[in-house]
Image (cartoon, helix red, strand yellow):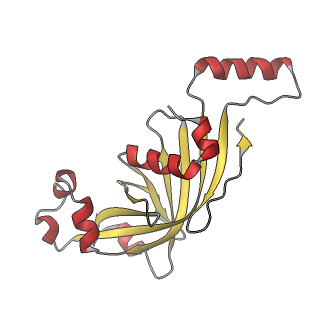
Amino acid sequence: MSSLTKARENPKEQLFDEIDKVNAGMLGVEGSHMHMQPMAPQLDRQSATIWFFTKTDAEIVHAIGPASRAHFCVVGKDQDYHACLSGRIEVRKDPVKIDEYWSSIVEAWFDHGKNDPQLTMIALRLDDAEIWASTGSALKFGWEIAKANFNPDEEPDVGVKAHVVFNEMPTAGFHRMI
């Protein structure tokens, strides 16, 4: 369940925790005219970079050019956390990252293992993200709706929206979610 307190106090840490919990999110290259596609994230918290394994002949690899930007969208496993991240994207066959993130699941996609000629990686260096964390409690949700229905000047307080900036001092702006 999404923590509203953590969303208010440390949205970056919560975002990273949520990324680590999901098996896949949706990745899309800006201006490429291709639909977003599911990709399995490998998060490097220190550099605020998400790595993805893929094949060199994949459509998304061909859509990435110099100075390309992309969005990666995540929905938490409990459906009470949503995030859209953006940043610069590049194709990088980094042997250190391949070793670091290699697993039996990844190996299933590459017949020749780490030496597969089709193996490459995509690196999404994060610039910023918008997150929405909502209450998973039906009781709290119902209470907030009832309060708002009895008081026309009040909106339900069922979640937090925050903006996270990477590679600078993290900042966040908070708004009540409707």
Q: Relative to residue 5, is residue 28 drawn left or right?
A: left
Is residue 55 visible to the viewer in this orientation of the structure? no
Q: Residue furthest bottom?
A: 66
Q: Residue at x 41, y 74 (%)?
A: 90
Q: Relative to residue 12, is residue 171 drawn left or right?
A: right
Q: Relative to residue 136, is residue 41 drawn left or right?
A: left
Q: Nearer the viewer, residue 76 or 97?
A: 97
Is residue 46 visible to the viewer in this orientation of the structure? yes
Q: Is residue 4 above or below residue 25?
A: above
Q: Residue at x 45, y 79 (%)?
A: 65
Q: Is residue 91 above or below residue 13?
A: below
* Image-quadrant location for residue 154: top right
Q: Is residue 148 above or below residue 122?
A: above
Q: Residue at x 65, y 49 (%)?
A: 162
Q: Is residue 139 above or below residue 61?
A: above
The percent coordinates of residue 178 (x first, y second) are 72, 35
Q: Nearer the viewer, residue 90 or 171?
A: 171
* Image-quadrant location for residue 177: top right
Q: Residue furthest right?
A: 153
